[in-house]
Image: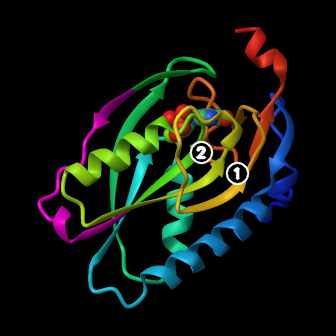
Amino acid sequence: MTRTLPGRDTVMHSDIERVLISETEIDEIITRIAKEIDRDYSGSDRKLLLLCILKGSVVFMGELMKKITVPVEIDFMKVSSYGAGTSSSGNINIMLDLYRRDLDSCDILIVEDIIDSGRTLSYLVNYLTLKGAKSVRTVTLLDKPSRREVDFQPDYHGMIIPDLFVVGYGLDYNEKYRALPFVGILKPEVYTHN
Ligand code: IMP
Ligand code: MG
């Protein structure tokens, strides 16, 4: 049976006010970042470890690792800085740690969905450096520099966005909307009716 599917960029969720970054744009952004990573890490005889920060970065990680052509290993950490809703608690909790004996031969590239206050990544870079990683760099799909509370710059970034709470492409609001294939802005009533 043949089914006609609508273009994925045009599929909207009723809670979304508007699409901020379409699936096609995200694909172009990730292609560009993967080339930058390839350029910087090619020829290295060390291990490049892509470290996905769960859960928000899982979609970005999946796409990015397919586009990077230098050999990589992957691993996962789970941290939380956000409480319920749209405000950060300010405290970083490690829910799933990284257990490896070979960190002294690993170039770690932390893969993050979005930087907001900067606390999560500045904490993690410090933590992994103290744990003995050979080098630690960061890549983020989205960056909200206007929200910074600590001085932090990622090594690679996809797109700078204004101070808006966004969902989709892995990002959630109270665990919802992660599976949307685009980055979108929620309708205000979704927050206020909660
Ligand atoms: P930071 O420690 O304040 O930089 O927070 C980073 C984390 O907050 C991200 O990994 C996300 O999980 C979450 N976060 C920040 N902004 C947003 C947003 O607009 N939508 C969804 N999650 C967000
Ligand atoms: Mg996150």
Q: Residues within 10 Å of mark 1 (few under 14, many from 20)?
A: many
The span picked out in magenta is: 92-108
Q: Measured from the top left, where is residue 165 in percent x and y?
A: 72, 31
- What residue does disc 1 label? 181
Q: Is residue 186 above or below residue 118?
A: above
Looking at the rendering, which quadrant does residue 106 occupy?
bottom left
Seen at 47% across and 23% down, the residue is 90
Amino acid marked by disc 1: Pro
Q: Which residue is mark 2?
A: 114
Task: Examine the structure image and report whether residue 38 is included in the region drawn in magenta.
Answer: no
51 on left or right of 7:
left
Q: How many marks?
A: 2
Q: Cβ(mark 2) to ligand 1 < 8 Å?
A: yes
Residue at (51% x, 75% y) in the render: 37
Q: Nearer the viewer, residue 81 or 130?
A: 130
Mark 1 vs mark 2: which is more N-terminal?
A: 2
Provide the secondary structure element on which disc 1 rests.
loop
Pick the quarter of the image with the N terminus: bottom right
The magenta stretch spans residue 95 = yes
Residue at the farthest front position: 151
Image quadrant in which you'd find residue 135: bottom left
Amino acid on which disc 2 is placed: Ile
